Each structure stands twice: as C-alpha cells, then as structure tokens.
Amino acid sequence: MPVREHDLREIREAVAKLCATFPMEYWRKADRERRYPAEFVRALTEAGWLSCLIPEEYGGAGLPLTAAAAILEEVQKSGANGAACHAQMYTMGTVLRHCSEAQKKKYLPKIAKGELRLQAFGITEPGAGTDTSAIRTTAVRKGDRYVVDGQKVWTSRAEHSDLMLLFARTAPRDKVQKKTDGMSVFLVDMKVALGKGLTIRPIRTMINHATTEVFFDKLEVPAENLVGEEGKGFRYILDGMNAERILIGAECVGDARWFIAKATAYANERQVFGRPIGQNQGVQFPIARAYMATEAAALMVERAAQLYESNEPCGPESNMAKQLAAEASWQAGDMCLQTHGGFGFAEEYDVERKFRETRLYQIAPISTNLVLCYLAEHVLHLPRSY
Ligand SMILES: Cc1cc2nc3c(=O)[nH]c(=O)nc-3n(C[C@H](O)[C@H](O)[C@H](O)COP(=O)(O)OP(=O)(O)OC[C@H]3O[C@@H](n4cnc5c(N)ncnc54)[C@H](O)[C@@H]3O)c2cc1C
C-alpha cells in the first residue's frame, strides 16, 4: 500500500531527530579513524528504521520502499553516512520476494529485533568486475550442503554483519544456455562460517565504508540456505539491485540537499568585498543549478520507488534514478566545495568528507557507463556495445 504524505513527513521528522543526536564530530572522528559507526547503526536499528521493509507478521513495520527511501534520504541530508547500514534495506528486495517461508520465519524476526544484521551483499569479484556473469565463485552441491570456493571484493560491512547474501555459480558459464543462467543466491551465516572456510580482509579506502575482500575455501553452506531455485539467482538479485539503485538514488538526493543547504548558508554568511558572497550571481547560479538537478532527480527516485512497490517493471527508472541522483549530488558537492573556497578543504566543515563519500555513487553499485549501456540497449534498442 502506498505510504501517505503525512506519514512520510512524520517518518522524516523522526529520522532527522535521531540523526541530530549524532553531531558532525561523531562522523568526522569515525571517518578519521575509519571506524564503523556502530552506535548510529544501533540507534537506527532500535528505532526500527532498518527493519522498516520487513512485513509486520515478521516483526517489522511493513512499510513500502518509498518510506525506506525517505529514511535514507533524511540520514544523508543530516550529514551522516547511511552506507554503514543501507544494505539491510536493499537486500530485502531479494529476501522478501524470493526467500522461502521457512527462511523468512527463521531470519526476519531476528533481523527486525536487531539480533541479526543482514548487511553484506557479495556479488562483485576482482576477475569479473561489472560482468556479473563472469563470476568464478562456485557453489557445488554435496548432499545436504553446498561447498563454496572463490573470492569476492568490495563486500562492504562484512565484518559488521551476521548474514551475507552471496551470489555464486552453481553451473559453469559454458554449460548453460544463457550466461546469466546457472547462478544462485545463498544466505550465508557469516558468524558460523568465519574461520571455517570464510576469511575477511578489510580494504582501506578514501571513505569510511568498512569494505572488505572475502575469501571462500571449501566453505560449507546448508542446502536449506539456497534462496529460491538453483540456477535462477540472477533474476533474484535483479530485484535486490533495483531496490539498491532506488535507495542509493534517495541517499544521493539527501547528500545533494545537504550540500545545497550548507552552501546556501555559507554564501549568505561569508562576507568578501564588503558583501555576502551569495550576492554574486557567479556564486548563486551554481547553487540554483544544483537545486534544479536535485529536484528533478528526486522525482525520478520517487517514480522508480512507486513502480517498484507496485511490483511493476522498473529497471530503466531505477537506473535513471540512481544515475541522475548521483550526478546531482556530485554537482552539488562540487558547487559546495567551490562556494566554501579554501575552507571547503578543512575537515571541520564536513564538505570534503561528504564530497568524498558521494563520489562513490558514480561507480557503485553500478558505474555511470553501464547505466548508459543499459538504457541504450534495453530502452533505446541500440546494438549491444559489449
Ligand atoms: C567502496 C565500495 C563499496 C562497494 N560495495 C560493494 C558491495 O557491498 N557488494 C558488492 O558486490 N560490490 C560492491 N562494490 C563494487 C561495485 O559495485 C563495483 O566497483 C562496480 O560495480 C564497478 O565494478 P568494477 O569496480 O569491477 O569496475 P570495472 O567493471 O572493472 O569497470 C571499470 C571502469 O570501466 C568501465 N567499463 C567497464 N565495462 C564497460 C563497458 N562495456 N562499456 C563502457 N564502460 C565500461 C566502468 O564503467 C568503469 O568506469 C563496492 C565498490 C566500492 C568502491
């Protein structure tokens, strides 16, 4: 059921209030130390926001994706970084639509209570990159288990998650009709697996993202943890990916709104040549342009979320939402840095941190070129370029 405008406003206000209890110094310190913002994630969990998509019968709030998008947008708009926990929302795209009743009963109530975290989504591999069908991590059925071997890269939050949605090949690429066939999704209990075939190695990056490399060496996963049918996993992760693109689009809109508010305040307050810098059109216009781009992107995010929650096809809209919003946030970030002059580089203004953080979304979860390739091929029916 669509969420009402009034409810969305209340959700936004409540999330903003929670975020206000985590001052910018908290995020600066976490960024400086590359420390996982555990307290913030705990607070969001306890308030029930991270389980908002889980149906009420399993202990969640049963809200639609539009509400999840509003929550994450609000988190980013406050200057915080929802990347520490957003996966718990977008993995629901796969879990709610494709897990069995038994799997849902086993895991969802514990996730809703905050006893378990599902924050890791293991798809990308070093050797495959964007070409997901080229993944080499395999899961081979042996009786009542699958034996997993291989490697993932950029598996974010793996050290801070209890469960991982893992994507692996269950049939070799040259033995299937379509190269996207023969891949499957598993729910991996990481706490059980750690040290018994699962190794996690952190990767230090330009942002505080708790991302890692994950290695599988004869890791045994119970067959009951297979999601849906063996070999059909590509279709299942697409649902997760569309949800992810929409939610990340919402986060980018939140980032853009933070940059615009920050730049506007500074442009009104900073006096140079005896007047506020914001009186100069050279300073005003980039802010107005960023605002325009952000509002347009927000409409596409809203549209994609509505299609998604009505179970309508939404591949083009999800991709466009993510891309337009990522471009708007980057434009706004660049504008905000420029508006601040030299002070934009100072840690205490938080602009340089948010600038680094929002840059990610031109690359992850899918890079700009691949969104354009998708639209060219699947929407405009141009020849496939790769
Ligand atoms: C901080 C961070 C967190 C991440 N978290 C996760 C996570 O939790 N789980 C997960 O599974 N993955 C995660 N990723 C991985 C992310 O989704 C990938 O980095 C992204 O999809 C791009 O893949 P790649 O890095 O292998 O780039 P590549 O596929 O190697 O591409 C490199 C460049 O070439 C371009 N390119 C490639 N092929 C073409 C083509 N045919 N036409 C035009 N251009 C092309 C791309 O656009 C890109 O600019 C994360 C990445 C980062 C950096």
Image (spheres, helix red, strand yellow):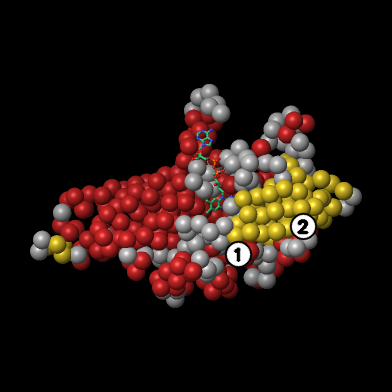
Q: Amino acid at mark 1?
A: Ser
* Nearer to us in this view, 37 or 257: 37
Q: Residue furthest left?
A: 274
Mark 1 lies on a secondary structure that is: helix
- Taking the spot 81% from the left edge, 55% from the top edge, the residue there is 220
For residue 294, above or below residue 194: above
Q: Position of residue 204 (x, y in %)?
A: 53, 59
Which secondary structure lies at badge 2?
A: loop
Q: Is residue 86 above or below residue 42?
A: above
Q: Which of the image's four quarters has the N terminus?
A: bottom right
Q: Nearer the viewer, residue 317 or 141?
A: 141
Dividing the image into four quarters, tell me where ligand 1 lies: top right
Q: Do we see residue 172 in this rendering?
A: yes
Q: Is residue 224 visible?
A: no
* Residue at image location 15% in from the left, 64% down from the top: 271
Residue 282, image x and y in percent? 19, 50
Residue 77 sits in which quadrant?
bottom left
Query: Would the CB of label 2 be found within 8 Å of ligand 1?
Result: no
Q: Residue furthest top?
A: 383
List the residue tagged with mark 1: 51
Give the crowd class for mark 2: few <14, some 14-19, many >=20 residues within 10 Å: some
Instruction: Give the residue type at disc 2.
Output: Gly
- Residue 77 vs 303, above or below: the answer is below
User: How many residues crowd mark 1 within 10 Å: few (<14), some (14–19), many (20+)?
Assistant: many
53 or 122: nearer the eye?
A: 122
Mark 2 and mark 1 in contact? Answer it, CB < 8 Å.
no
Q: Position of residue 23 (x, y in %)?
A: 41, 74
Placement of 14 over or under 154, stated as above or below: below
Pointer 2 residue: 197
